[in-house]
Amino acid sequence: MKKLTALVLALCMALGLAACGGSKDTGSAAGSTAAASGDTVKIGVYEPQSGDNGAGGKQEILGVQYANSVAPTVEIGGKTYNVKLEIVDNESSNDKAVSAASQLVSQGVSVVLGSYGSGVSIAGSQYFADAGIPAIGVTCTNPQVTAGNTHYFRICFLDPFQGTVLANYAYSELGAKTAYCLAELGNDYDVGLCHYFQQAFEALGGTVISDTFPTGNSDFTSYLSNATAIGAEVFFCPVSIAYSTQIINQAAGQNVTYPIMGGDTLDSNVVVEAAKGTNVKLYISTFYQEGGSPEFDEGFKAWLNSNSEALTNNGGNDMIAAVSVMGYDAYFVALEALKAAGSTDSKAVNEALWDVTYDGVSGHIAFDEIGDAARDSAYIKTANTETGAWDFVTVQTVE
């Protein structure tokens, strides 16, 4: 089991047994109390601030920053520490994510939060593992993020669940029997979620036609036309914010009649703004709906509106994205782990995370033997093309 492996490793290091890998460099900067400088403990924030997912990454960071403003200190081992956020940009790129991960290691963080995007989470994972630093995935939903390692945790639902939820909704609620799936070639999140959607949709008796597009593509008219030609009754495209806005604009230009569906990455005010004033029917799954916690909503909106840079990073308005809520909850999960560890040592924090439980804005959070949170429901939203806001549809579960 993953937890048992982590415990054995921790015991081996404590006893100094060379046979348990004492000769391996586990990261002197990250795996020691050097993570705390004076009375400061560092939390790494590993998110895209540029590239295809930059808009979503900025909103996830906002949740973390707001949480830090609410709770800027933490009690660790009877001592009060200031919490410093070390924020790096992984640029929505698996290649450039490596440099961002290495930067956090060199900065001596005790724990990492992120990322928005499964591919960059997977790309940076080994660097955190080698340095002995635990990471808490905020909205990275691909199963491979936590599979086969002892350091990566996550607080969100996974794509097998999300894909099934969306397939069930498309088939049973939208009445779709033929689906067209489109993913960016080589993108772990897109391809994985399309796979799970197809698997569930076909199990229900539906038919799926799958396709991919190359990175950097900007013309989606042929894909939209292909969906029309096969008689698709739903167009499933769990792609980045940048691609989804182009697809929505071009779908509006073609006056498509089938609904467009996407996963949690599409839960952005940038995406819903793209649908405003069009005839596009857009549905998404996500982690939170504004109004779910009035206390959080009020506080977050007030914080956004008092900070012009934060408001800009939120897309220019105070609409609450689910990823901001998840960033907020992830920060407090990290604080709980630091308190439970009684130390800023990253390895102690890693071990403490297994038993952390937290009742957050997004719901109850506890980790299983893989390091995943047990989530059994998702919010379905639809774009209100008149107001440019998300309307709540239902909470969807899988039986």
Image (cartoon, helix red, strand yellow):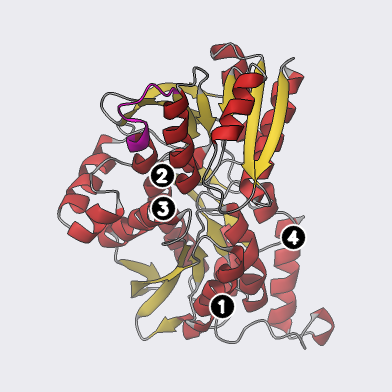
Q: Position of residue 150 (x, y in %)?
A: 69, 62
**Magenta span contains residue 376:** no
Circle 3 residue: 327
Question: Considering the numbered disc 4 on the image, is that residue within a helix, a strand or a loop?
Answer: helix
- Mark 3 → mark 2, Cα distance in angstroms: 11 Å
Circle 1 residue: 102
Labels 3 and 2: the sequence-earlier one: 3
The vertical placement of 135 against 267, above or below, is below
Residue type (three-letter) at the residue carrying disc 4: Leu
Question: Considering the numbered disc 1 on the image, is that residue within a helix, a strand or a loop?
Answer: helix
Quarter where residue 274 is shown: top left
Question: Considering the numbered disc 2 on the image, is that residue within a helix, a strand or a loop?
Answer: strand
Circle 2 residue: 360
> Looking at the rendered structure, which numbered label has been put on residue 332?
none
Q: Residue at x 58, y 60 (%)?
A: 120
Q: Position of residue 324 (x, y in %)?
A: 37, 48
The vertical placement of 325 against 332, above or below, is above
- Mark 3 → mark 1, Cα distance in angstroms: 21 Å
- Mark 3 → mark 4, Cα distance in angstroms: 28 Å
